[in-house]
Image (cartoon, rainbow, N blue to C red):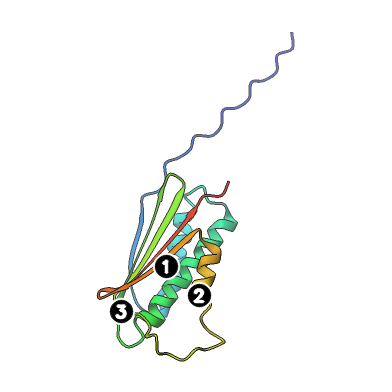
Amino acid sequence: MNASPSPSPPPPISPPPNPLELTFDADATQLAPVRLALREWLGRTRFAADQSADVLLAVGEACANAIEHGHRFRAGTIRLRAWLTDDYLRVTVHDSGRWKPDDSPPNPLRGRGIPLMRALMDSIAVTPDESGTIVELGTALRL
């Protein structure tokens, strides 16, 4: 009798990592360490490399905007939080600065950050208020 081997069970789905919470100075020198921390955190999820790259680019842009626009006149801090719920990633980037004034002249070489984030993520919301600006990004795990 020739018995065929039984198929291996699928690997267990590991629970998502704890939320990533970072607080950092609003300084461009902090962007590389923030991207590294987010890249390592994403590596503990089920996100594929190409989708992780999209998330890294979108979140990096949100952090760069918080530094450049939110803190262009004064020092401050930025808080980043990333968490997974039912294969949906949510990231918030909250700065303690002020939103870019609407009276700035248009520059054809600038202004691509928010459209870039919209193209890379499933959802994006930008909410300025008295305590700073919150950028909320979200995307579903692509299988």
Real-space Cα separation, disc 2 to disc 3, in angstroms: 18 Å
Secondary structure category for the residue under label 3: loop
Q: In x, y percent, where is residue 45?
A: 48, 49
Q: Residue at x 50, y 75 (%)?
A: 113
Q: Is residue 86 above or below residue 130?
A: above
Pick the front one: 4 or 13: 13
Task: Count neighbours of disc 2 (C-alpha within 10 A) and say few if under 14, some if 14 to 19, many if 20 or more.
Answer: some
Which quadrant of the structure image shows residue 119? bottom right
Task: Count neighbours of disc 3 (C-alpha within 10 A) and say few if under 14, some if 14 to 19, many if 20 or more.
Answer: many
Residue type at mark 3 is: Gly
Real-space Cα separation, disc 1 to disc 2, in angstroms: 18 Å
Q: Is residue 6 left or right of residue 37?
A: right
Give the mark nearest the N terminus, 1 or 2: 1
Q: Is residue 15 above or below residue 113?
A: above
Residue type at mark 2 is: Gly
Q: Identify the residue under disc 1.
A: 34
Q: Where does the N terminus fall, quadrant-wise?
A: top right
Residue 113: which disc?
Answer: 2
Secondary structure category for the residue under label 1: helix
Are the residues flagged by discs 1 and 3 in contact, CB closer than 8 Å?
A: no
| Most distant residue in the top direction | 1
Which quadrant of the structure image shows residue 81? bottom left
Secondary structure category for the residue under label 2: helix
Q: Identify the residue under disc 3.
A: 97
